[in-house]
Amino acid sequence: MRACRHAAAVLLAAAMTAALSGMPAAWARAPQAVEDRNPEAASGTQARELVRAPHYMMVSANPLATQAGQEMLRRGGSVVDAAIATQLVLNLVEPQSSGIGGGAFMVLYSAKAGRIQTFDSRETAPAAARPDRFLDAQGKPLPFAQAVNNGMSVGVPGLLRGLELAHKNAGVLPWADLFQPAIRLAETGFAVSPRLHALLAGNKALPKQAAAAAYFYAPDGSPWPVGHVLKNPEFAGTLRAVARQGADAFYQGDIARDIVAAVHGHATPGDLSLADLANYRAKTRDPVCGAYRGYQLCGMAPPSSGPIAVFQMLGELEQFPMSRFAPGSVESVHYFSEAGRLAFADRDFYVADPDFVHVPVRAMLDPAYLRARGALIQPDRSMKVALPGDPEGKLLSLGRDNALELPSTSHLVAVDAQGNALSMTTTIESEFGSKIFVRGFLLNNEMTDFSSSFKDPEGRLVANRIEPGKRPRSAMAPIIVLRDGKPVMLVGSPGGSAIINYVAKTIVGVLDWGLDIQTAIALPNMGSRNKETELEKGTALEALAPALERMGHPVRITEFPSGIHGIVIDGNGLQGGADPRREGLAAGG
């Protein structure tokens, strides 16, 4: 019976792919997402060395943040304690990427229980949200610039509720202690980093918001220079209140009123309400898990599409000898990109908030289904654009998502002395979020992670459409890799929808090519989001373009500023790696 299902799936997938070169199916004409752009600008690279430690390890996108987490681990704190302290400092020193005005996905391995837990603090749509939120009078999607930087783009922040829930489950140190590094830095000041300066200089929308301009720019309108000591006493006050009273201080009372007032006071006001904030709840969810070459991989379930897509790519690649294809070879890029096309095709139709729509996770990760999808990959020819598979026979009931999706994000990983492990990806959506600055922090623009159209041209509803209280689909992919039930690798990245390719590349680098985590992270980024085959600009991959084009690949050379951070646990202890494309630091003890 299983063989019959496998054969049928191969025939169906082949027929669907053949249809693409002839008369395309009606659902293949659904609105496409906007051109893939980077959530954050590239800001150069800096060589990173592999870091080893015997007992604990912390990796994040900024040295000051890593040091805050390391301080908690040194004091005997848990990975959750370290992640909270790190996140709060990231909000201060890397405000373009994440913060308490946004949300996160956390994947946690408990050494005592021997199991994975996940915490969903994804933002939600306000109760007043309508599905035509980002459509113009003619029913067409608004340009991204009109949708993103205003009150309508702000979803209900979830991060602090999620951190509080995780702390109640697995915290060791007192909640208030975890806020002290960020409070100290906010009061005494921190030096503006080269990356923050570059992003401030390049962002044209942020200076147009008065409160943000007053903090991030000098009186003459110029971005604060590298090394300028930037203080944020308002943020220190916000953190003090939450340290004393818990997350309730954020979701009720004066802070909540100021958030709502800032959203409603924008030139394009939003509909976030005090009730939306008071009613927000973080969730624990069962992890989604897949398999690859004898390893088990677990990550955040929907509304995240990231781990599902990564596991699909790996499941499709498993039938090919990736270990024989050298990193940076035409073969490795070809197979990797084709698997990406197939995974992204499924993602655009099926994944959304499971509290609102059925997501066929089990069918999408069925080994027979993935073998059938992978069998569509030809060794010498690109499929250019893949059509979605039909894991449950319900494809024609759905429309294609066209989310704007440019989430600016950060990722951190930690292992503590007790063997607990954590992988967390955190975001405020696009660079500097909605640009609305209140109480010392930025609010997200997460609503643009929903599909801007709620129906396709044939009238079929899009799974990731806007609905009140719904969580937008995400590409964030915090993942823990296990062998015999114990973690051996933690990984994740920022980067919008390209997160999926960044994380899959790093896993292939470690598991197939036998690289250490730092070398795997530093590999040139590559892949396809079911459009062009993208090759990282300024790397050796550029030379592959002619050969790939002869195979039918539509090639695009582009900046690929990932922020991959990872830890590998091996027989010699812990090895940590930070992405050379950002300012991260791995540190342990």
Image: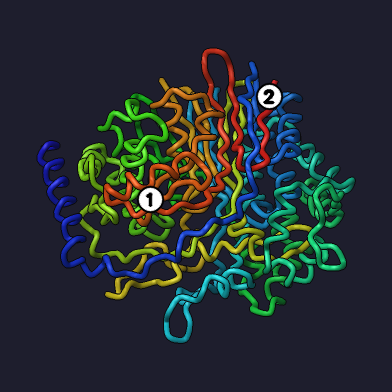
Q: Residues within 10 Å of mark 1 (few under 14, many from 20)?
A: many
**Residue that badge 1 annotates:** 533
Residue under the point 52% across and 65% down: 448
Q: Which residue occupies the foreground of this view, 178 or 434?
A: 434
> Does 159 appear above or below 290?
below
Number of numbered discs visible in the structure rendering: 2
Residue 96 position (above or below residue 22): above
Residue 547, labelled with which disc?
Answer: none
- Tell me if 413 is positioned left or right of 343 in this view: right
Counting from the top left corner in percent of width and height, residue 251 is at 69, 59
In the rendered image, which quarter is residue 307 located in?
top left
Q: Please tell me whether mark 1 sits on a helix, a strand or a loop.
A: strand
Sequence-earlier tag: 1 or 2: 1
**Residue at image location 48% in from the left, 82% down from the top:** 136
Callout 2: 10 Å neighbours few (<14), some, many (20+)?
many
Question: Of all residues shown, which one is farthest toward the top?
Answer: 571
Q: Residue furthest right?
A: 188
Residue at 69% x, 30% y is: 172
**Of the residues shown, which amino acid type is indicated by label 1?**
Thr
- Tell me, yes or no, if residue 300 can be seen here: yes
Where in the figure is residue 404, as x and y percent of width and height? 48, 64
| Residue 131 location, quadrant | bottom left
Q: Nearer the viewer, residue 454 or 217?
A: 217
Q: Secondary structure at mark 2?
A: strand
**Which amino acid type is marked by label 2?**
Gly
The quarter of the rendered structure image containing the C terminus is top right
> Which quadrant, please, contains the N terminus?
top left
Residue that badge 2 annotates: 588
Label 1 – label 2 distance at C-alpha: 37 Å
